[in-house]
Amino acid sequence: MSKAKKILFVTQEMMPFVPETDMAQMGRYLPQAVQEKSREIRSFMPKWGIINERRNQLHEVIRLSGINIVVDDTDHPLVIKVASIPAARMQIYFIDNDDYFLRRSMALDAEGKEYDDNAERAAFYARGVLETIKKLKWSPDIIHCQGWMGSFLPLYIKTAYAEEPSFRDCKVIFTPETQTFTSPVPANMDGIIAFRNATISATRGLGEKKLVPMLNKLGIKYADGIGFLAENKDLTKYAEGLGKPCLQPISTEEYGIHYPNFYDTIWNIGRVEEEES
């Protein structure tokens, strides 16, 4: 069985840049564990407004910034920043934009309410990551995307970016959101999703009227494998019903044991048949 050597992590949260949560722990320790297994990695996360740029020594990467991403017919400039975690020998790329992240927190505002444009923020983030990877001229074998912010990645990779050289042969792992959110699917979801051949038709049959449950199922629908952070019987049943291989929750200490093997398993699905044909 061949190995997936290049792994792209599209994280929603990562310590020490944001407060500690189970997802922030995964964002921090999973890439390090995989890198220590001699895999080449890249990591991306949103430049949430709560991140202190000076303390974390973020700086803009001019050569990667400067393009506009259109979400629902509105242009949004893409800014790429970078920082490092010296103890882990990891470099982190940050997707930034004043409209979506400046002086704004993560999913919830200061009053604990969900932002009305969270779906737009997720679509911008997904396409920002993919456009940056193209500029880096780097072709991942596995893309592991995490949370509601990573939920559009599987769809775009399998549709709008399917013929891009950087993504043509990659496989996608999705980790569903674990927090419970209640905001409805926005009325302009068709415009938010729309890019090239990705359309609102991707959401048909998901049966969810709330945004985050819908995004969880959308990510599962288009991913090649699912890595759960928390037990979820309903989403496990949905994933298994679609024939998706699943890795159930494991401790951070076991990341370096189970995830490289899971990535290799997903990477090799269909490859033997292709090589023999």
Image (spheres, rainbow, N blue to C red):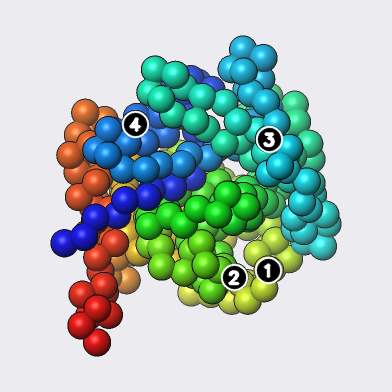
Q: Distance of mark 4 from mark 3, alpha carbons?
A: 23 Å
Pointers 1 and 2 in contact (CB under 8 A)?
A: yes
Residue 253 visible in the snapshot:
yes
Q: Distance of mark 4 from mark 2, alpha carbons?
A: 30 Å
Residue 254, percent from left and from top: 19, 34
What residue do we see at 62% from left, 12% from top?
Answer: 55
Residue under label 1, please give it: 195
What residue do we see at 59% from left, 76% from top?
Answer: 201
Q: Which mark is residue 106?
A: none
Residue 255 versus residue 269 in the image, above or below: above
Of mark 4 and mark 2, the one earlier in the sequence is 4
**Numbered disc in front, either 2 or 3:** 3
Q: Which mark is residue 32?
A: 4
Of mark 2 and mark 3, the one earlier in the sequence is 3
Q: Could you tell me which secondary element the residue under label 3 belongs to?
A: loop
Amino acid type at image mark 1: Phe
- Camera-side residue: 120 or 142? 142
Q: Which mark is residue 160?
A: 2
| Relative side of 4 to 75, left or right | left
Q: Distance of mark 4 from mark 1, alpha carbons?
A: 33 Å
Q: Residues within 10 Å of mark 3 (few under 14, many from 20)?
A: some
Amino acid type at image mark 2: Ala
Of mark 4 and mark 1, the one earlier in the sequence is 4
Residue 259, percent from left and from top: 25, 45
**Numbered disc in front, either 4 or 1:** 4
- Camera-side residue: 19 or 111? 19
Q: Distance of mark 1 from mark 2, alpha carbons?
A: 7 Å
Of mark 4 and mark 3, the one earlier in the sequence is 4
Of mark 1 and mark 2, the one earlier in the sequence is 2
